Image (spheres, helix red, strand yellow):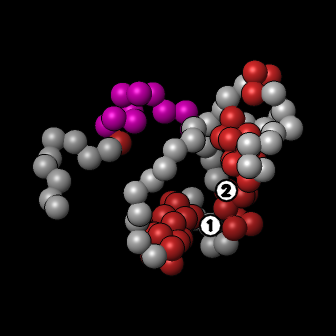
Amino acid sequence: SAGFGAVMARKQRENGKEEADLSEVVPEGVEGTLLYRGNVSEVIHQLIGGLRSGMSYCGAHNLAELWQKAEFVKMSGAGLRESHAHDIEMMK
């Protein structure tokens, strides 16, 4: 079954015509808009940098190695808060 956001996107594409009754759809995910973040190439550059960084943490040199070596761990709320910058003022 499609998520709620997918149903709304389909509804917009089909000018209000939709295949499924919305009352039967179970929402999943979110739907919204984002502020403009610049040229898509700059955004992709940041995504690639994040992927390369994550690959280096688990010693992967390519995507196949990433699939083999990556390990997901469950983090507590306290651990998540501690893992982010705290007790500092961010510079603009």
Quarter occupied by residue 42? bottom left
Q: Can you name the residue that lies furthest to the right here?
A: 19
Residue for point 57% across, 41% down: 31
- The residue indicated by pointer 2 is 69
**Image disc number at residue 60:** 1
Give the percent coordinates (x, y) of residue 14. Answer: 78, 50
On the rendered image, what quadrant is the N terminus found in? top right
Residue for point 49% across, 50% down: 33
First in residue order: circle 2 vs circle 1: 1
Q: Is residue 71 left or right of residue 37?
A: right
Say if mark 2 contacts mark 1, CB within 8 Å. Answer: yes
Look at label 2 and name its amino acid.
Answer: Lys
Look at label 1 and name its amino acid.
Answer: Ala
Task: Tell me the CA gap for discs 2 and 1.
Answer: 7 Å
Give the percent coordinates (x, y) of residue 43. Answer: 47, 70
On the rendered image, what quadrant is the C terminus found in? bottom left
Q: Is residue 28 left or right of residue 41?
A: right
Q: Can you name the residue that lies furthest to the top here?
A: 23
Secondary structure, mark 1, is loop
Q: Which residues are magenta?
A: 73-82
State how many labels appear: 2
Residue for point 80% across, 22% down: 24
What crowding class fits label 1: few (fewer than 14 Cα within 10 Å), some (14-19), or many (20 or more)? some
Residue 7 magenta-highlighted? no
Give the percent coordinates (x, y) of residue 8. Answer: 68, 41
